[in-house]
Image (cartoon, grey):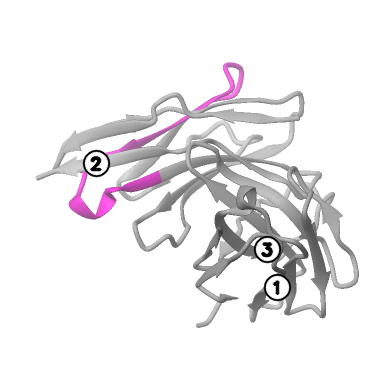
Amino acid sequence: NAGVTQTPKFQVLKTGQSMTLQCAQDMNHNSMYWYRQDPGMGLRLIYYSASEGTTDKGEVPNGYNVSRLNKREFSLRLESAAPSQTSVYFCASSHGQPGTGGVSEKLFFGSGTQLSVL
Amino acid sequence: AQTVTQSQPEMSVQEAETVTLSCTYDTSESDYYLFWYKQPPSRQMILVIRQEAYKQQNATENRFSVNFQKAAKSFSLKISDSQLGDAAMYFCAYRSAYDNDMRFGAGTRLTVKP
């Protein structure tokens, strides 16, 4: 079972370079998410997509853009990387959509991308 | 916005003993879900246990159980008969029933001593 697949696993960028992190899930989930993990701060939501064709900002969206290409894929783009974006990035997915109420929704996570911006 | 606080950056436990990890949260909502995730050195996030706020009964999964105190907004994780494989970062998380943002605490690093 592949679950949530992220690529690449590691990346080093120079300040100002751009790159796209790819994420795909094979569980037919409706919702997909991008988080970043920094030491002492847990995981923080960057962007999410509640369904195909929709995206919304999370807690820390500045400097990022996303695309929900289809139901399976959700990419995260850094247009001009900055050292403050050095982090571990996680993609996640879940079956349900917000507002349904009464549904306990866990997230399924990818294995993460370690990004360093020099 | 909801916040999740884990006041113990690091904890250690002797193998076979019991340890409790603390978590408190702040919310004005009545319908939400709470989670504990484990992150071993592999970086993979693994769901340990979850609790629905409308359930009074504390969730249990084998050696893992929670003490959910809704009025106090507290959600602690108890690990019984600790094993070496339990060593990891543990994150407490809160999710409203009505939006998409799962809020995480800063994490507690658990060390298990043989």
Q: Position of residue B40 (x, y in %)?
A: 35, 56
- The image position of residue B59, as x and y in percent, is 47, 41
Vertical relation: A82 (above or below) A66: above
The CA span between labels 2 and 1 is: 35 Å
Q: Which mark is residue A100?
A: none
The label number, if any, that marks residue A20 in the structure image: 1
- Under mark 3, the amino acid is Ser
Question: Start and end of the magenta stretch?
Answer: B69-89
Quarter residue B76 falls in: top left
To which chain does the residue with label 1 belong?
A: A
Question: Which subunit holds the residue at mark 3?
Answer: A
Question: x%, y% of residue A95?
Answer: 71, 66
Residue for point 59% across, 22% down: B73
In reply to whether residue B91 is colored magenta, the answer given is: no
Q: Which residue is mark 3?
A: A94
Mark 3 or mark 1: which is in front? 1
Is A89 displayed left or right of B108 in the figure? right
Residue A21 occupies which quadrant of the picture? bottom right
Q: Measure the C-alpha gap from mark 3 to mark 1.
A: 22 Å
Q: Earlier in the sequence, mark 3 or mark 1?
A: 1
The disc at residue B111 is 2
Disc 1 is placed on an element classified as: strand
User: In this rendering, is residue B109 above or below A19?
Assistant: above
Q: CA distance from mark 3 to mark 2?
A: 30 Å
- Name the residue located 77 percent from the left edge and 69 percent from the top edge: A30
Which residue is most to the left?
Answer: B114
Asked if marks 3 and 1 touch (Cβ < 8 Å), the reply is no
